[in-house]
Image: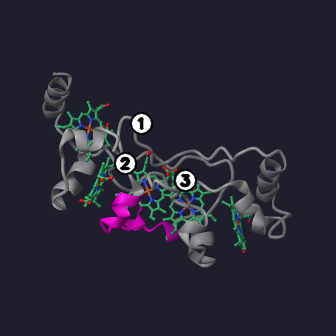
Amino acid sequence: MKLLLLAMFWFQQGPGPAPAPPPPPTQPVPYSHKVHAGDLKLPCKTCHTNPAPGEVMGLPEVTTCMGCHTAVKTDSPHIQKLAGFAKNQRPVPWVRVYQIPSFVFFSHKAHAEAGATCETCHGPVKEREVIRLESNITMGGCMKCHEQHNASNDCSYCHTPK
Ligand code: HEC
Ligand code: HEC
Ligand code: HEC
Ligand code: HEC
Ligand code: HEC
């Protein structure tokens, strides 16, 4: 019954146009994917390890950064700020860009196994100085791709944990 009411709510609203993407957030340290994943060719998994069971990609520990930055660019105020987080054993408070509510189930591993690449959903990250929302990860956006790939669009598929 509750689901039926939810369904009625959804069909009344319709997916509608994707909301205008918000501007990229200001991050605590101006980290650049273009420099690290592009120019320096660091693989994504150096920093995004996708630990089992594979739902999240995760963000790197500051120790990963300090592997290089105890020696590289130590005169930069940005690197000094980074070193401060490491010294105090505090995580860097990165501002999330792609985030869906906790009542939605999403697995990176399942989508990688279905053949989607990072670029499919996150755009050409290696060319980006800053990360911003580049694809539609609203319910309408998810459903559109599921429809195109004959994946289920049953409410329970995305709203019940596996
Ligand atoms: C494999 C080594 C390596 C790792 C790991 C690494 N960096 Fe870097 N980073 C570099 C190099 C090399 C540069 C300098 C590029 C240049 O300007 O020539 C750089 C530049 C930077 C700069 C620009 C500094 C400035 O003021 O010019 C920031 C900020 C930065 N890195 C942050 C990070 C963060 C945050 C992490 C961890 C998420 C990280 N780096 C991990 C090698 C690394
Ligand atoms: C040296 C470490 C490092 C490497 C290599 C790296 N990233 Fe990241 N990534 C980060 C850090 C730090 C953040 C958080 C700051 C930001 O959003 O720019 C981040 C954020 C992201 C985000 C946004 C997450 C969110 O929701 O806020 C995406 C998407 C992403 N990375 C994709 C990639 C892809 C794809 C690759 C490989 C092409 C890659 N990253 C390589 C360190 C790295
Ligand atoms: C089918 C679309 C899709 C693909 C493919 C995809 N992502 Fe994501 N990514 C998302 C969504 C949706 C979120 C938000 C997840 C959440 O909030 O639970 C996200 C979140 C992230 C985050 C933030 C941290 C986290 O784990 O939530 C990072 C980092 C990231 N993705 C990196 C990557 C990398 C690297 C790849 C390729 C190996 C990749 N993504 C492939 C859709 C995708
Ligand atoms: C690039 C196209 C694409 C996008 C975008 C996409 N999906 Fe999927 N998704 C698929 C495909 C294809 C499968 C089917 C995998 C299979 O049949 O094994 C799938 C499977 C799933 C599964 C089942 C995974 C499992 O563990 O069995 C869930 C849940 C899911 N998607 C949720 C989402 C959500 C939530 C979003 C939006 C945030 C999303 N998807 C965006 C293509 C996509
Ligand atoms: C392919 C994955 C997927 C499927 C299938 C799906 N949803 Fe969702 N749903 C999402 C995502 C992602 C969000 C959060 C983003 C948003 O609000 O658009 C969401 C949000 C919602 C919300 C909250 C809306 C709001 O404005 O906060 C409701 C209610 C909902 N879904 C009901 C349903 C019902 C009913 C069905 C079946 C007709 C369904 N969903 C099928 C992915 C899915």
Give x and y (percent) for residue 103: 37, 35
Mark 2 in CB contact with mark 3 (< 8 angstroms): no
- Please tell me which of labels 1 and 3 falls first in the chain: 3
- Judge the density around disc 1: few (<14), some (14-19), many (≥20) Cα neighbours within 10 Å: few
According to the picture, the residue beneath numbered tag 1 turns out to be 102
State left or right for residue 127 relative to residue 89: left
Residue 40, compared with residue 150, is above or below; it is below
Give the secondary structure at mark 1.
Answer: loop
Q: Name the amino acid type tagged 3.
A: Gly
Residue 106: which numbered mark, if any? 2
Q: Amino acid at mark 1?
A: Ser
Q: Is residue 18 visible?
A: yes
Identified at 72% across, 55% down, the residue is 62
Can you say which quadrant of the picture contains the N terminus?
Answer: top left
Q: For the residues marked 2 and 3, what is the alpha-carbon distance in whole angstroms?
A: 13 Å
Q: Is mark 3 within 8 Å of ligand 3?
A: yes
- Tell me the CA gap for discs 1 and 2: 9 Å
Frontmost residue, 143 versus 38: 143
Say if disc 1 is inside 8 Å of ligand 3: yes
The residue segment tinted magenta is 109-126
Disc 3: which residue: 58
> Which quadrant of the figure has residue 65?
bottom right
What kind of element bears circle 2? loop
Q: Quadrant of ligand 4?
A: bottom left
The residue closer to the viewer here, 33 or 54, is 54
Residue 91 numbered tag: none
Total numbered circles: 3
Disc 2 residue lies near ligand 4 with CB under 8 A: yes
> Where, by quadrant of the figure, is residue 46 drawn?
bottom right
Q: Position of residue 136 (x, y in %)?
A: 32, 51
Using the rendered image of the protein, determine whether residue 121 is visible from the camera's viewpoint.
no
